Image (cartoon, rainbow, N blue to C red):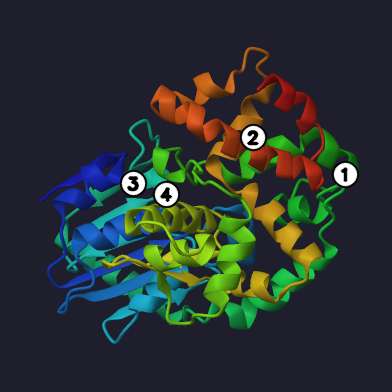
Amino acid sequence: MFTRLIKGPLFYNWFFENIPKKSIRISTTFIKKYATERLIKYYGLKREGIDIDIIVRGNFADFVSGKSDISAIQLLKLLEKERFKIYRSKKQKSNFCIIDGQKLLIGYFNLDEESLFAENSMVAAIGTNDANLISNFNLHYLDVLDNCEKYPEISKEFEYKYKKFYKKFSTDTTDEFFKIISSQANDKEKFNSFSRNLIINKCEGSYIISPKNIPQYSNLEDGTFKIIEILKKNNSGMSFNEIGVGLTGSGKKDVAYKKYGENHSKLAELLDLVYITIDSPRKVFLTDLGKLFSRSDLNIKIKILHNQILRIPIIQDIIKNWSDANFNLIEYLNKFLAKSTAIRRTPNIKQLLAFLENTGLSGISKKLKKL
């Protein structure tokens, strides 16, 4: 019998050692697509014979602020079946994982990159196989489940909220964005003075920066407006190759189509407008936010893009580091990427920052000249 402190990264220090044979029960406040996908792949949660329950808080503000991804929910909904269920509990308070009813991890952790994979993570939890403790906790789990609901289709509930949010959202002051993600943002002047800090502070701990979430694309319009229009016409999903053909036209080699389609699909997923399946060949589908984007007028589309770009970890972190007079974008990117790759990605980052400037986030133009 053991009961001990488990320090992050929790994937390698606990989940890696405890592979479920019969069941897994997870309760998480926040949920991110990349972390969820890696856990599903490693545990083989698509295989038959395992009972899977995942409880997520699922508040609207969590998705707006970037703490949770719609694409993660929709990936799980795609996998949902009789023995694989996803629930929502807006009153969710405790985060835990129970493996086979015999092993318990409990603490403040989430299904996100920071909790599971960050080497310098300060996340910690208690792991135990104490039979009496777990027996009592299993009873608590049943009480938690009684206060949950089967996770609804996001579009049925969130579309109204998103529409209301974006109609009120002002790209001149970004008032509504910060009202939703910060309970402290009551003074309008604070939006101008502390808006960048609010972005970072409200999303602190919900991500880590890695090469996988640093944007890489050739054409911003292709990775936003055009890819959405292409997918809007295909409810059965599309491969990277098919998307590449749709975006560039005929006459290129398959490898070029696949790479172009993959890069622009991953940009759209980073913006939570699409989700990419796990199976090979991987397919791309619109999220419910992507569907709302496809049905919206240009003004709403621009507001959605503005908000979703603010969710990108590297964008948030760059804004946070602008207070450093010696900040150099290429040197900064070189912390995560090879120098040649950092140089290639720099125009992408600058373009996204310029988009934010052009759609209402003030003070960027002077910084762009120095980057």
Contact, mark 1 vs mark 4 (Cβ under 8 Å): no
Q: Earlier in the sequence, mark 4 or mark 2?
A: 4
Q: With 269 as the anchor, is 188 left or right in this view?
A: right
Going by the numbered disc 3, the residue's amino acid type is Leu
Find disc 3 in the rendering and name its residue: 116
Which residue is painted at 34% across and 80% down in the image?
80
Which residue is painted at 68% across and 38% down in the image?
353
Give how far apart the Cα atoms at labels 1 and 2 are: 30 Å
**Seen from this angle, which residue lies furthest bottom?**
82
Find disc 1 in the rendering and name its residue: 187
In-front residue for pair 242/359 = 242
Q: Secondary structure at mark 2?
A: helix
Quadrant that contains the C terminus = top right
Contact, mark 3 vs mark 1 (Cβ under 8 Å): no
Give how far apart the Cα atoms at labels 4 and 2 are: 35 Å
Going by the numbered disc 2, the residue's amino acid type is Lys
Contact, mark 1 vs mark 2 (Cβ under 8 Å): no
Give how far apart the Cα atoms at labels 2 and 3 are: 30 Å
